[in-house]
């Protein structure tokens, strides 16, 4: 069985880690960007309404083209 190297770090990861050390303020910018775009409060009731309103999709969406 092949030996797995757990200590490998890609060139990209090394680059990002070095840049983060040089620019620690990026961490705050990163967190602010995440909060702006992704971390949103969820409305459970509204999500249930959306889930209930879904229409089941046909198994093959182009069946309409072949109906005679």
Image (spheres, helix red, strand yellow):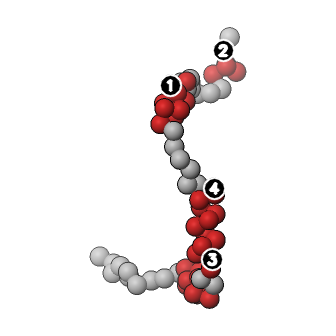
User: Circle 4: is it few (<14), some (14-19), or many (20+) Cα within 10 Å?
Assistant: few
In front: label 2 or label 3 = 3
Tell me the residue that label 3 is attached to: 26
Using the rendered view, name the quadrant where residue 34 is placed.
Answer: bottom right
* Percent position of residue 35, x then y: 59, 59
User: Circle 1: is it few (<14), some (14-19), or many (20+) Cα within 10 Å?
Assistant: few
Marker disc for residue 41: none
| Observer-nearest of 20 and 56 | 20
Q: Residue at x 60, y 73 (%)?
A: 28
The residue most toward the left is: 1
51 with respect to 29 (left or right): left
Residue 62 to residue 1: above or below: above
Q: Mark 3 near mark 4, Cβ–Cβ under 8 Å?
A: no
Marker disc for residue 52: 1
64 with respect to 7 (left or right): right
**Mark 4 or 2 closer to N-term?**
4
Tell me the residue that label 4 is attached to: 37
User: What element does badge 2 sit on?
Assistant: loop
Gap in Å between the C-alphas at discs 2 and 3?
A: 56 Å
Gap in Å between the C-alphas at discs 4 and 2?
A: 43 Å
Q: Residue at x 55, y 79 (%)?
A: 13
**Mark 2 or 3 closer to N-term?**
3
Residue 35 to residue 15: above or below: above
Gap in Å between the C-alphas at discs 3 and 1?
A: 41 Å
Q: Residue at x 68, y 11 (%)?
A: 68
Marker disc for residue 67: 2
| Observer-nearest of 28 and 16 | 28
**Mark 3 or 1 closer to N-term?**
3
């Amino acid at each position: 069985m092949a030996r797995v190297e757990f200590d490998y770090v890609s060139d990209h990861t090394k680059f990002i880690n070095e840049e983060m050390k040089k620019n620690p303020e990026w961490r705050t910018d990163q967190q602010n960007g995440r909060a702006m775009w992704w971390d949103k409060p969820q409305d459970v009731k509204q999500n249930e309404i959306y889930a209930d309103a879904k229409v089941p999709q046909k198994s093959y969406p182009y069946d309409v083209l072949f109906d005679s």
